[in-house]
Amino acid sequence: MVKIGYARVSSTGQNLDRQIELLQHAGADKIFKEKQSGAEIKNRPELLNLLDYIREKDIVIVAELDRLGRNTRDLDYIISTIQNKGASLQILNLPTTQTQDPNLNRLLNNLILELYKYIAETERQKIRERQKQGIALAKKQGKYKGRKKKYTKDSPQLVQAFKLLDEGYSIRKASESTGINYQTLRNYIQEYRK
């Protein structure tokens, strides 16, 4: 049995020291460290290395649940991968239960995890909703201009895409030929070619 820690911050400017100290204090023998956004698992090589490294009876330790993932889908995948390998998960800021029956322990800990995943997902949805409301209000007040457009009407790529469309190319072919994202090109067509 090996205790394996996982520490993650979202950007290179942030510091892992606090998490590493907590993981060492919890007895982690090995720690995987990552400075990556939690948005997509495929962009987190150290998490993938950890999931490949763990073996039966190992214990994966994280300081907080959101260090593993920020949405229910990713958390379900990560937790089930850990459990399917016969390892267990310890989250330092969550309450744990220890009974004589390991099956009861697993059940109670899974219940606690499900509650916290639900809370985290609900909070994430609230943040998105507040952000939408803030943007709508800023637009109403004329303070929000949105993201700067990648192309102007006179951008060579966009001019070329419109030329190809006039020659009978499909939007998809014009997109592929010019390197403009398909949906982006559709949006520019709607804006500039009404």
Image: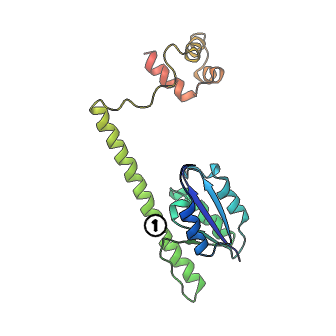
Number of residue marks: 1
Q: Name the colouring of the figure.
A: rainbow
Is 124 placed above or below 137 here? below
Quarter holding the N terminus? bottom right
Determine the residue positioned at 56% across, 62% down. Answer: 17
Q: Please, which residue is most extreme toward the left here? A: 141
Q: Which quadrant does the C terminus fall into?
A: top left
Residue pointed to by mark 1: 116
Front in this rendered view, residue 147 or 111: 147
Vertical relation: 45 (above or below) 115 = above
User: For the residue carrying disc 1, how many other residues have a C-alpha within 10 Å: few (<14), some (14-19), or many (20+)?
Assistant: some
Q: Position of residue 38 (x, y in %)?
A: 55, 53
Rendered image quadrant of residue 16:
bottom right
In the image, residue 89 lies at what x, y percent?
A: 59, 71
Q: Quadrant of residue 162?
A: top right
Identified by mark 1, the residue type is Tyr
Q: Residue at x 63, y 48 (%)?
A: 43
Tell me: 92 left or right of 6: left
Q: Tell me if 173 is positioned left or right of 191 in this view.
A: right
Q: Is residue 81 left or right of residue 111?
A: right
**Residue 41 placement (x, y as % from top left):** 61, 52
Residue depicted at 51% across the width and 56% down the height: 70
SS type, badge 1? helix
Task: Kindly indicate the quadrant of the structure image that contains residue 147.
Answer: top left
- Which residue is located at x 46 percent, y 66 percent? 116
Of residue 75 and residue 48, the one placed in the foreground of this image is 48
